[in-house]
Amino acid sequence: MHYPQYQQDLNTALESEILGELIFLNAAKYTRSIEQQQKWQTLAKLETQTLQRLEDFLAQHSHTASTRPHIKLQAKASGIAMAKLPWKAAMHLLKQGTQPFMETFERMTQHADATTREFLQYLLAHEQALAEFAAQELQGNHQHSLEAVLSLLKSEA
């Protein structure tokens, strides 16, 4: 599975998971709301799980991926900002933030072969679960907003 921007897409995937994990961990650390803290921590768990699966995928297929040097600092600052924003504003940003990654993961899935399809479908599903969480929160469905995320976490347990 090699198409012109495959390496760039692998790098984007790695950055996406590192960014997500650190943004959510920092948002959890700096938020004042216990409920929001628990939600951020659950999102971080999904990113940690996905990052581990991505690293396994890269190793299994003898691929490498790299990130830009400022990504971790950007993620920490973004996480702190997300914690300080009004919840609805943070959810709008989260939902918007998933879009470019979804486009990348959709492209990767379209080029998938039998050996890569399952993982790449999971990668896309995890990003869709984050967008669904934000959409549910924006609709006021706070009690069930994590269902898609939790189902992906359970599938790995």
Image (cartoon, grey):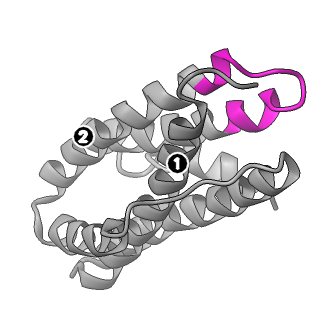
Majority SS type along the magenta span: helix
Relative depth, front residue between 91 and 146: 91
Decide: is 50 above or below 93: below
Closest to the camera, between mark 2 and mark 1, is: 1
Relative depth, front residue between 25 and 109: 109
Secondary structure of residue under mark 1:
helix
Residue at the front extreme of this rendering:
4
Residue drawn at the location 68% of the way across and 47% of the way down? 152
Q: Position of residue 100 (x, y in %)?
A: 36, 33
Q: Position of residue 125 (x, y in %)?
A: 61, 34
Q: What stretch is highlighted in magenta?
A: 108-122
The residue pinned by badge 2 equals 138
Residue drawn at the location 87% of the way across and 51% of the way down? 60
User: Could you tell whether 40 is left or right of 5 in the image?
Assistant: left
Residue drawn at the location 60% of the way across and 31% of the way down? 6
Secondary structure of residue under mark 2:
helix
- Looking at the rendered image, the quarter that the C terminus falls into is bottom right
Disc 2 to disc 1, C-alpha distance = 30 Å
The quadrant where residue 4 appears:
top right
User: Could you tell whether 35 is left or right of 116 in the image?
Assistant: left
Label 1 crowd (10 A; few <14 / some 14-19 / many >=20): some
The quadrant where residue 123 appears:
top right
Q: Which amino acid does label 2 sit on?
A: Leu
Q: Where is residue 96 in the image (x, y as percent from the top left)?
A: 26, 37
User: Could you tell whether 58 is left or right of 29 in the image?
Assistant: right
Q: Is residue 144 magenta?
A: no
The residue pinned by badge 1 equals 11
Residue drawn at the location 58% of the way across and 39% of the way down? 7
